[in-house]
Amino acid sequence: MANSTHTPAEQAHRTIHAGGEWLAASSGATREILDPADALPLAVVAEGDEKDTDLAVAAARRAFDAGDWPHTPVAERAGLLRRVADLLVRDREKLGLLESRDAGKTVEEGRVDIDCVADAFRYFADLVAGEAPGRVVDAGSPDIHSVVVHEPVGVCAMITPWNYPLLQASWKIAPALAAGNTFVIKPSEITPMTTVALIDLLVEAGLPTGVANIVTGPGHTVGARLAEHPDVDLVSFTGGLVSGTKVAQAAAVTVKKVALELGGKNPNVVFADACETEEGFDTAVDQALNAAFIHSGQVCSAGGRLIVEESVRERFVAELARRAQKIRLGRGTEDGVECGPLVSEQQRAKTEDYVASALAEGAELRCGGKRPEPSPQRPESGYFYEPTVLDHCHREMRVVREEVFGPVLTVETFRTEDEAVALANDTEYGLAGAVWTADAGRARRVAGRLRHGTVWINDFHPYLPQAEWGGFGKSGVGRELGPAGLAEYRESKHVYQNLAPKPVRWFAG
């Protein structure tokens, strides 16, 4: 971290940034961060609590109420975001490796994440710089000037998950800064390292003191305090449904703006006509593997529900299972590894429980379903689990209803288009889904009927910074990315100017 006067051992514990200073936790508490590939210590960070959170919120409040950032010209704010993007490109290898070791993903996935983070900062820089200063509203009189302008919300609290630590942080930080807000971010307590590094890059890029603040610590103290804090104007949370519900309840007391990006149970619907050619069949199978097993299935938009037309089910599932068995598991920094460990022992145990319950409820195990044999690339102490395909699943199974967040793919079948749509929509969530078909008309019909925030046709997982990301049902409220993502971090003000005021004489006398 920049400009430290502390020894390396002291500095390693100073991961709370408030009011321009790197600090240890006020209690002196620390947390050991483990590498999920071998369960060995990777780093030690400060374990903040409510007192540290209050300190960071106070710094953000001062920077918003008395600082220059909210009033900084748009072009200057955009320029700072572009400088941050350039610094991310400069540090791509270092940050990609850190993301890999912290979250367990492959180093190539880590590099791609850093590229996407840089893209997000550039996108919001361009978006805010190209906007009109306000929207004129016709008041029907030449003596009235009426305009709707946008202003920053204020102090933003950001709570991010462990699966895409820096990417999810950027989806919140970039639009918040573009709009002129200050913020306090709480990264996941088990994957905080790249978010800590990003705060250093923001400072290096010239962000004023107090605008960016971070508190490393657990959700039940730091996250809970941020959600309820009276000096926080907006809380943006990405994570699980249970925690998101608690955030919404706490924020309601002070009537904060709330943005929640929660879980998903995402259908991947494959019609037989998508598999009529060998190329079509191979592509659909390949993308089903990608949908379910990228980052070991630890993705909110993972296509963990394969819903395939009955006439091609056996051939499709057999090939899918054959190829899933060949996925190379190992430490994400090793060459040739295609899938890393789960993020924690707790997450692996949760995955094992879901698989056991599915088998008890009648599912057929086509591949996986166990921990792999140890190898030099897969230490026995690491949190590895084989990619798993469960056939003959149905809606009553827990593994079909609930978000697993592990490398588990369930298979359901259908015979008609209406049945496919009904199965895909039969979920409490509504985050993402996909449809595979060679029939363009069917593609549009099914996509239009799916109740999910993002629908891919003949693809899975791509996202565009320019588009909106959000869900229906229990997948959350609010939007990230695109113009709507910027709008989340703004308030609208109607300025009405009467150029020729006259007495109203509404009341007698």
Image (cartoon, rainbow, N blue to C red):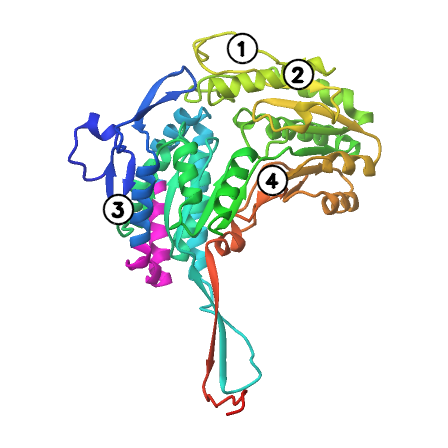
Is 360 rendered above or below residue 216?
Answer: above
Q: If you read the primary sequence from the N terminus, does the residue marked by circle 2 or circle 3 appear first?
A: 3
Marker disc for residue 475: 4
Depth order, front residue of 468/355: 355
Q: What is the distance, in whole Å, between disc 2 and disc 4 at their CAs?
A: 24 Å
Q: What is the distance, in whole Å, between disc 2 and disc 1 at their CAs?
A: 20 Å
Inspect the magenta stretch and tell me whether residue 114 lies in it: no
Q: If you read the primary sequence from the N terminus, does the residue marked by circle 2 or circle 1 appear first?
A: 2
Is 132 rendered above or below residue 199?
Answer: below
Depth order, front residue of 424/128: 424
* Amino acid found under the numbered disc labelled 3: Gly
* Amino acid found under the numbered disc labelled 2: Ser
Q: Are marks 3 and 4 in contact (CB under 8 Å)?
A: no
* Amino acid found under the numbered disc labelled 1: Pro
Q: If you read the primary sequence from the N terminus, does the residue marked by circle 1 or circle 3 appear first?
A: 3
Q: Residue furthest left?
A: 5
Q: Which span is picked out in magenta?
A: 63-88
Q: Is residue 305 visible?
A: yes
Image point (37%, 62%), residue name:
74
In the rendered image, the quadrant that contains the N terminus is top left
* Amino acid found under the numbered disc labelled 4: Ser
Marker disc for residue 372: 1
Image point (51%, 17%), residue name:
329
